[in-house]
Image (cartoon, rainbow, N blue to C red):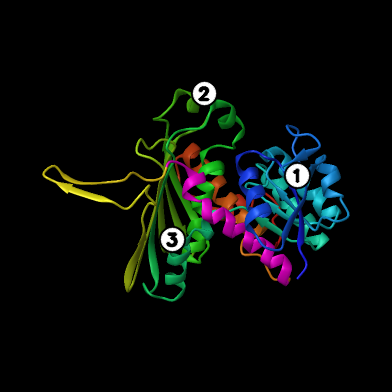
Amino acid sequence: MKNIKIGLIGLGRIGLIHFNNLKYQIPYAEVVMVADPRHKEQFKGVVVGTAEELINHPEIDAVVICSPTNTHADYIDLCAAARKDIFCEKPHDLSLERVITTLETVKKAGVKLMLGFNRRFDANFKKIHELVNLRKIGEPTILKITSRDPGPPPLSYLKSSGGLFMDMSIHDFDMARFIMGKEVEKVYATAAVFTSDEVAEAGDVDTAVINLTFMDGSMAVIDNSRKASYGYDQRLEIFGSNGMAQADNNKHDSHLLVDQEGSHGALPLDFFMDRYEASYRLEMMAFIEALLKGEGLPVDGHDGLEAMLIAIAAKVSVDEKRPVLLKEIRNTIRIKAL
């Protein structure tokens, strides 16, 4: 079986994770070139070039985009023109209009585009998804997702992130669609600033509760915070007509101390790079396998678009203090079947 030859743009935190997985952990993947202005000529034995050189390299089959968000759509368009398949970290742009035009470009070019919603590949959440699909809990009616970071990012990041809903909650919006297997009809969100003056300075919020109503009337409740003093809090519970299923935090270890003062155990892992280390590898493996087998992608541009629509509706809900129907957001722009 031939190798899929990869070019990777951006060697920040996520880019380095994907680079190391592709180079050392994933069979049938070969990193041919990387592009990052902080590196010259070679990086860990791989040739460094410009993004344009990489995209147009005749040997490269697919491009992994891990550069800043404001470059994603331009690189996707260039990859489509060069007939390169694409893996892109979310979101692929902060403008709904630009997202739709790039999805149309990708579709017209006939190339594959996978979005980086790595939590779908986490073993805990994937198991819950399987249990729901096997009808082990009957018809799912209530989903609860807790997602809290250990601390807010720096002001420079907050100003360019697109806000809590587009940057952080968007993973939970995708997870809600993935676990429930249903589409969202209505969004109602409340939010505030509790953790950092820099969050308010950036015009953002750091704490939110989002209620989603699906087309069949079933519901999801998502709570987000930029600061959990005890670590990276990632939990999920789904309730159905025949039972319920839960996924708890991954912790530093599984010890339990019981004494006269009570029960004591380890804290949750520190941050997403620890908590989701395996899921990053598995999502990239799924991308490579889909290219090798000529199969459909497990997460595509449509999934990214749907999560983005929910994020926009949540922001409108907070600003206007009301429930927002997703069709309101769709009606603001021409959205074709993608």
Per the rendering, the mark at residue 201 is 2
Image-based side of 49 in relation to 115, left or right: right
Element type at mark 2: helix
Give the image location of residue 236, x and y in percent: 39, 56
Is residue 332 visible to the viewer in this orientation of the structure? Answer: no
**Circles 3 and 2: CB atoms closer than 8 Å:** no
Element type at mark 3: helix
| In this rendering, the label closer to the viewer, 1 or 3 | 1
Where, quadrant-wise, is the N terminus in this rendering?
A: bottom right
Label 3 is placed on what type of residue? Asn
How packed is label 3: few (under 14 Cα within 10 Å), some, or many (20 or more)?
Answer: some
**In which quadrant of the rendered view does residue 285 lie?**
bottom right
Q: What stretch is highlighted in magenta?
A: 270-293
Q: Mark 3 points at which residue?
A: 124
Of residues 180 and 278, the one drawn nearer to the viewer in this rendering: 278
Of residues 93 and 279, the one drawn nearer to the viewer in this rendering: 279
| First in residue order: circle 1 vs circle 3 | 1
Residue at 65% from the left image edge and 44% from the top image edge: 15
Quote the CA–CA distance across marks 3 and 2. 36 Å
Image-based side of 102 in relation to 207, left or right: right
Label 2 is placed on what type of residue? Glu
Establish if 33 lies above or below 217. Answer: above
